[in-house]
Image: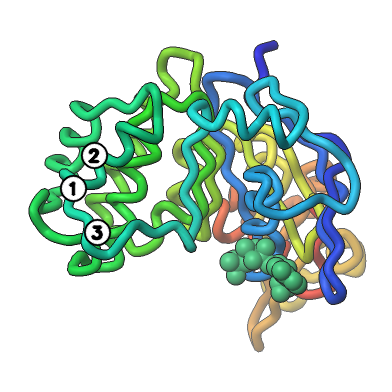
Amino acid sequence: MNERLNVTNLAKTYPEFALGPLTFDLPAGYIMGLIGPNGAGKTTTLRLLLDMAQPSSGEFTLNGAKTADARQQARDDLGAMLDSTTLPDAWTMKDVDSNMKRLFPHWDSQQFMKLVAQFDINPKTMYRRLSKGTQNKVNLAVALSHHAKLLILDEPMAGLDPIARDELRQLLQSYIQDGEASVLLSSHLTDDLAQFADYLLYLIHGEQRFFGETDTLLSRYLLVQGGSSELTAALKNRGLGLRQTSVGFSLLLPTADQALATGLVTSTPDLDTLMIYLGKRGEDHA
Ligand SMILES: Nc1ncnc2c1ncn2[C@@H]1O[C@H](COP(=O)(O)OP(=O)(O)OP(=O)(O)O)[C@@H](O)[C@H]1O
């Protein structure tokens, strides 16, 4: 299969934080969501993949390039946006366009100006005078306007209103439609992400807890609710993220153990619910 990303045992150790080993791949034509609680290692993962940090061990291939030099050579094939991404303060959209044209051989001015209009950005306003969310939109428009085969986006939905988030979702879906390009994006808006990410990479405290299809993760667990007297020892033992009130309880139960919940109220959890229960300290199996 034509892979945009192939990551093998990638790890990074800081004095007070260890990430990995991470092993996953992203085929051409798909969207992967990177999820996990604060401090899980999402941005660190993206920085490694963008060669902005050196791995402690492991390796990865990006758009077929195996070394940092080869990846640098092929930078036009990569569109990236991190929280730290910024443009010169005084640039108007015209300046962005003319400068990016020089930087990227496949820069598409028409596409960029179309996105500027679609995002309702005044092309004459200087970058520094735009709101934070609008600056994000400009950075996104840049990433989306040079026909990159892989987009790596850190929290692209942060600061966007619901309409803009919906527009972005549609833009990303059409971006991958020809089966050539792929998108890796991190987000805390996991329910939004679950609607359009084909794959999920789920990190907790730097560890890779799940990599696979979104539907597979969602079908792994049932949310079980019952009265206090219905909480059996077996449910306590197999359940995750137990929550108790004076009248009842709720927990996540692996689907394989669903017989333990016979007669109780069960439902398929959404991704937010799943992360809340799985992320509870000391109970973070996925
Ligand atoms: N340059 C660095 N030196 C030391 N520690 C670092 C460095 N960069 C990141 N870390 C640590 O790595 C950990 C993970 O941070 P990271 O930003 O990757 O998490 P995250 O999942 O993106 O979090 P959030 O959702 O809050 O943005 C943090 O504990 C952070 O302090």
- Front tag of 3 and 2: 2
116 is higher (above) or lower (below) than 229 = above
Residue with the mark numbered 1: 93
How far from the left and from the top, in percent, is residue 9?
88, 41
Residue with the mark numbered 2: 97
Q: Quadrant of residue 37?
A: bottom right
The reply to whether residue 165 is visible in this rendering is yes
Is label 1's Cβ within 8 Å of ligand 1?
Answer: no
Answer with left or right where residue 230 lies relative to residue 173: right
Instruction: Give the distance between the C-alpha atoms of the residues marked 2 and 1, in whole angstroms.
Output: 6 Å
Residues at circles 2 and 1 in contact by the CB criterion of under 8 Å: yes
Q: Residues within 10 Å of mark 1 (few under 14, many from 20)?
A: many
SS state under label 2? helix
Residues at circles 3 and 1 in contact by the CB criterion of under 8 Å: no
How far from the left and from the top, in percent, is residue 123?
11, 49
Q: Amino acid at mark 1?
A: Met
Sequence-wise, which precedes: disc 3 or disc 1? Answer: 1
Q: Quadrant of residue 280?
A: bottom right
Residue at the spot x=72%, y=59% of the render? 252
The reply to whether residue 222 is visible in this rendering is no
Q: Amino acid at mark 3?
A: Thr
Residue at the spot x=70%, y=80% of the render? 244
Residue with the mark numbered 3: 134
Residue at the spot x=69%, y=11% of the render? 1
In depth, the one of 54 and 4 nearer the eye is: 54
Instruction: Give the distance between the C-alpha atoms of the residues marked 3 and 2, in whole angstroms.
Output: 16 Å
